Image (spheres, helix red, strand yellow):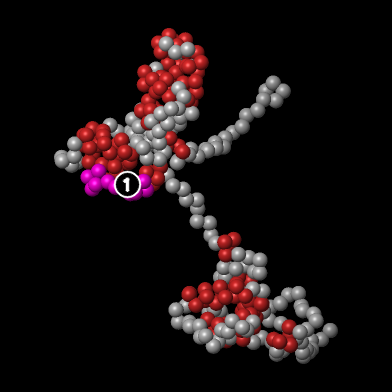
Amino acid sequence: MKASLQLKLGQQLTMTPQLQQAIRLLQLSSLELQQEIQQALDSNPLLELEEDQFDATKDPVNQALSDTDFSESVALPPEKDNSTVDTAESLTQESMPDDLPMDTTWDEVFTASPNSGPGGSREDDMPFQGETSEGLYEHLEWQKNLTPFSETDLAIATAIIEAINDQGYLTQSTEEILEAIGNPEVELDEVEAVLKRIQHFDPIGVAARDLSECLLIQLSHFAPDTPHLSNARMLIKDHLDLIAARDFRLLMRKTKLKEDELRDGIALIQTLNPRPGLLITPNEDEYVIPDVSVSKKNGR
């Protein structure tokens, strides 16, 4: 065995960045190519699109590939000429080697584009921005801004809304809200008047100070001719504790109502929402994953 030098002449196709860009652009539709060009123009303020260079009557794919200004604006590394064969002649060959030398990787090229191919879409490739939801505070603030309040009443309404919890109940008394406002010219009657207006915001019954007030506010929006409305209002005002205890015999004896009248009045009350704030801000399910699971097998 002896060492010798041999000279071989071969042909190979080098996947340069310019060729990779050309292959990617050939796969784009007319609309996607226009979006690609527009994105390049938006990202580089030094680029300009001349009317005579982009003709709508021509094929946009051939127009983009033949336009050297566009290929230079993508800011890819310069092409390295590692082959003695012309690129157009290489593409016409019947066979192509499996392992092609690359100046860069596919990820470096395709991750910079919002479109992943002919079937890709901008919505699929856009990053997830997270779920956005409106809470009860934002919902009440939106209604407050639409209500014709004076400057003083607007300050009172803001203080009241800030004192409402997620269930829709007022967590502070009107005296505490008046003290939090810190305006000596504001009286307690003004706070009560603004509170009455907010209690009729959506959801109905919000800003109530207790359950009885919350249910009565909701009943006030029923039609006056609603069946059993007066009985339901009387039960809420005077006997809400007995309804919670389900002491129906004592209720019939105190209210002097017949069994069917009591049943219909309670049925009307059950259509109301005791926690109106949860209609806007529902409770999120919390799942607890145990650290240890213990099971009993064969008595052990």
- Which residue lies under the disc numbered 1? 147
Q: Going by the image, does 34 lie left or right of 231?
A: right
> Which residue is rendered at x = 36% and y = 28% of the image?
213
Residue under the image location 37 percent in, 40 percent down: 201
Q: Residue at x 26, y 34 (%)?
A: 192
287 versus 144 height, above or below: above
Q: How many marks do you count on the picture?
A: 1
Q: Nearer the viewer, residue 300 or 42?
A: 42
Residue at 72 percent across and 89 percent down: it is 85
In the rendered image, which quarter is residue 220 located in? top left
Where is the C terminus found, in terms of image quarters?
A: top right
Give amino acid for label 1.
Thr
Q: Is residue 236 visible?
A: no
> Residue 273: horizontal and vertical position, in percent?
45, 31
Residue with the most extreme left position = 184
Instruction: Examine the structure image and report whether residue 143 is included in the region drawn in magenta.
Output: yes
Position of the N terminus by quadrant: bottom right
The magenta span reads 142-153
Dominant secondary structure, magenta:
helix
Give SS at disc 1. loop
Image quadrant assignment for residue 225? top left
Residue 268 visible: yes
Name the spot of residue 179 as percent of width and height, x first. Answer: 21, 37
Per the image, is 38 magenta?
no
* Left or right for 51, reference 15: left
Q: Position of residue 158 (x, y in %)?
A: 29, 44
Counting from the top left corner in percent of width and height, residue 14 is at: 68, 81
Is 92 located above or below residue 278 in the figure?
Answer: below
